[in-house]
Amino acid sequence: MTEVLGTVALIAGGYALYKAVKKEIANMAFKKQPAYATARKRAVDPAYTRLVEDPATGKYRPVSNY
């Protein structure tokens, strides 16, 4: 009985590995980029403020971009 359970687990693991590799190859074929790569290419919104370190206190204070 242990051999049967081991064989079933081995087949299930192999199938899961096959599906994962197939999905990864499909992503490479369409040249999809991960989320961090698309976020890095996105332009920065100028409405955000910039933080500048105050030399006297050592704390960061917001400075307007305008």
Image (cartoon, helix red, strand yellow):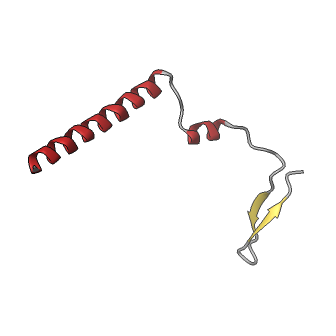
Residue 25, above or below 39:
above
Q: Position of residue 49 (x, y in %)?
A: 81, 56
- On the rendered structure, is 25 left or right of 7? right
Q: Which residue is rendered at x = 15% and y = 46% of the image? A: 6
Question: Could you say which is closer to the camera, residue 59 or residue 8?
Answer: 8
Q: Residue at x 10, y 51 (%)?
A: 2
Closer to the camera in the image, 1 or 35: 1
**Total labels drawn:** 0
Residue 42, located in which quarter of the rendered image?
top right
Q: Specify whether 11 is left or right of 47.
A: left
- Could you say where residue 57 lies in the image, as x and y percent from the top left? 74, 78
In the image as oriented, which residue stretches furthest toward the bottom?
A: 57
Position of residue 41 relative to residue 62, above or below, is: above
Residue drawn 80% across the image and 52% down it: 48
Q: Which residue is outermost to the top? A: 29
Q: Is residue 41 above or below residue 59?
A: above
| Rendered image quadrant of residue 23 | top left
| Above or below, comparing residue 8 to residue 59 in the picture | above
**In the image, 36: left or right of 13?**
right
Of 5 and 65, which appears nearest the observer? Answer: 5
The residue sitting at the right extreme is 66
The x, y position of residue 47, in whole percent, is 84, 49
